[in-house]
């Protein structure tokens, strides 16, 4: 049981390049989330999904797109990377049936845009 | 979700109890208090949550005041591995799938 995994762990992009971050969970969770964390700050929600085929915007969605084609995977895309998107990206998941609302987080992807 | 206020940093000696305060004076009746921690460069980790009563698990204890306007997370015997940023978060437990709102948290440093 790997929990929540993220690919890649590190990436350096040039301004204007595109990339996709992959999040996978093996806990059969319905809800999945993408957050970003800038230095010295708490996490901010980018997008989330309540189930396969559904996505919704969070606090800071601009410049990102997401897709949830399979229940276990949640993809975060950057179509045209900007230096302001340099950050650490965390994926999380939780079960809709959990009263505790405990979110399980992945190890993070460190992205640098030059 | 109600706003929370935490001290930016705290020190604690190894082996002693670490008491981390959180103010949430605008908490609503259906909102829970959650605590997460983030060890350097890792993803946040759930610690404990509570509504009204004090709670204890294998990691920590949560003390919520009777008026629910503040709470304290207690790590009973802090170790060096407990050095982390601790986040106090208030939100409803049921309904809605929107994410957690993280503030800047408290950076707890355990001193040897």
Image: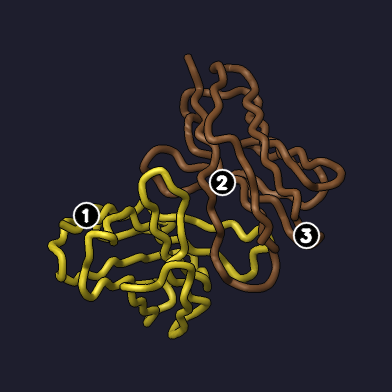
Which badge, 3 or 2, is on the more N-terminal residue?
Answer: 3
* Towards the viewer: A27 or B50: B50
Q: Chain A appears in which tint?
A: yellow
Task: Specify the subunit that label 1 lies on.
Answer: A
**Quarter occupied by residue B27:** bottom right
Q: Residue at x 57, y 24 (%)?
A: B78
Q: Are the two marked residues, 3 and 2, in contact with CB atoms closer than 8 angstroms?
A: no
Q: Residue A103, percent across and down?
A: 54, 58
> Which chain comes out brown in the rendered image?
B
Residue A113: x and y, percent?
19, 58
* Identity of the residue furthest to the bottom in this view: A53
For mark 3, name the chain: B
Q: Is residue A64 left or right of residue B69?
A: left
Residue on which the image places disc 1: A112
Up-down relation of residue B107 to residue B25 (above or below): above
Residue occupying the point 63% across, 30% down: B75
Mark 1 Cα shell of 10 Å, populated few (<14), some (14-19), many (≥20): some
- Colour mapping used in the image: by chain
Chain of the residue under label 2: B
Which mark, by number, is residue A78? none
Q: Which mark is residue B36?
A: 2
Q: Which mark is residue B28?
A: 3
Left or right placement of residue A56 versus residue B17 in this view: left
Q: Secondary structure at mark 3?
A: loop
């Amino acid at each position: 049981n790997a929990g929540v995994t993220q690919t890649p762990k590190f990436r350096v992009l040039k301004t204007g390049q595109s990339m996709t971050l992959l999040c996978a969970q093996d806990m059969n969770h319905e809800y999945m989330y993408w957050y970003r964390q800038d230095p010295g700050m708490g996490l901010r929600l980018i997008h989330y999904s309540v189930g396969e085929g559904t996505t919704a915007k969070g606090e800071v969605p601009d410049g990102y797109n997401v897709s949830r084609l399979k229940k276990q995977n949640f993809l975060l895309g950057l179509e045209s990377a900007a230096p302001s998107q340099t950050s650490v990206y965390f994926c999380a998941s939780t079960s809709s049936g959990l009263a505790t609302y405990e979110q399980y987080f992945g190890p993070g992807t460190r992205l640098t845009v030059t | 979700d109600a706003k929370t206020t935490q001290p930016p940093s705290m020190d604690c000696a190894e082996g002693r109890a670490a008491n981390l305060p959180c103010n949430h004076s605008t908490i609503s009746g259906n909102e829970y208090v959650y605590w997460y921690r983030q060890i350097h460069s890792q993803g946040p980790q759930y610690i404990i949550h509570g509504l009204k009563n004090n709670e204890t698990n294998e990691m920590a204890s949560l003390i919520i005041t009777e008026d629910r306007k503040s709470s304290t997370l207690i790590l009973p015997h802090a170790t060096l591995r407990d050095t982390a940023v601790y986040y106090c978060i208030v939100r409803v437990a049921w309904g809605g799938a929107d994410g957690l709102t993280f503030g800047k948290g408290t950076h707890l440093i355990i001193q040897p």
